[in-house]
Amino acid sequence: MPEDKHALIGHFQQMRRDLLAAIDGLTDDQLSGTTLDGWSVKDHLAHLALWDDLRTSEVERIAAGFDSAWRMSEEQTVALNDIAFSVRRGLSIAQVRWELATSHQRLLDAVSAATGRGLDASLYSEAALRSTHEAEHTAWITRWRGDQGA
């Protein structure tokens, strides 16, 4: 059964509002310090932008009648995340903020334009249609802020 398009968009918008609230007021030093399990807050944001891009491509692909291109094992997912972390680590805070904003808008646009098939969550794999991935990272950042008194 297809996801409700408006509910799905609302889900992604709420998760983004929560994420932005979690990073609100952080300085550039706080965003770029590698204190969160070896990742900086900026690294988490770049990671989320990548997964928005992957999810967007899946929505467009599946809506067009094709199969998921991101069926990965747990090991492959870890390897992809490690590679992405390594290549995106040097991005500036300004670029990561841009990546986060534009990837999110592309996702919302793709969901908005999706066909019923594109809204069928059963056709997705690792880049799931309805995901709580962003909420997990928001929780980590929020917990880190609490621990740091930031």
Image: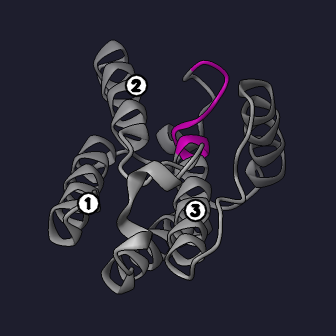
Q: Residue furthest bottom?
A: 113
Q: Secondary structure at mark 2?
A: helix
Q: Which mark is residue 96?
A: 3
Residue in view at x 39 percent, y 44 percent: 131
Residue at which label 1 appears: 3
C-beta proximity under 8 Å, tags 2 and 1: no
Q: Earlier in the sequence, mark 1 or mark 3?
A: 1
Instruction: Tell me which segment is drawn in magenta.
Output: 37-44
**Residue 79 x, y percent position in the rendering:** 82, 34
**Residue 90 x, y percent position in the rendering:** 78, 53
C-beta proximity under 8 Å, tags 3 and 2: no
Q: Depth check: 22 or 131 in front?
A: 131
Left or right, 39 with respect to 142, comes to right
**Residue 82 x, y percent position in the rendering:** 79, 35
Residue at which label 2 appears: 140
Mark 3 nearby-residue class (10 Å; few <14, some 14–19, many ≥20): many
Q: Earlier in the sequence, mark 2 or mark 1?
A: 1
Q: Quadrant of residue 60?
A: bottom right
Q: At label 3, which amino acid type do we have?
A: Val
C-beta proximity under 8 Å, tags 1 and 3: no
Q: Quadrant of residue 37?
A: top right
Circle 2 or circle 1, nearest the eye: 1
Residue in view at x 62 percent, y 57 percent: 50
Q: At label 2, which amino acid type do we have?
A: Trp
Q: Residue furthest top?
A: 147
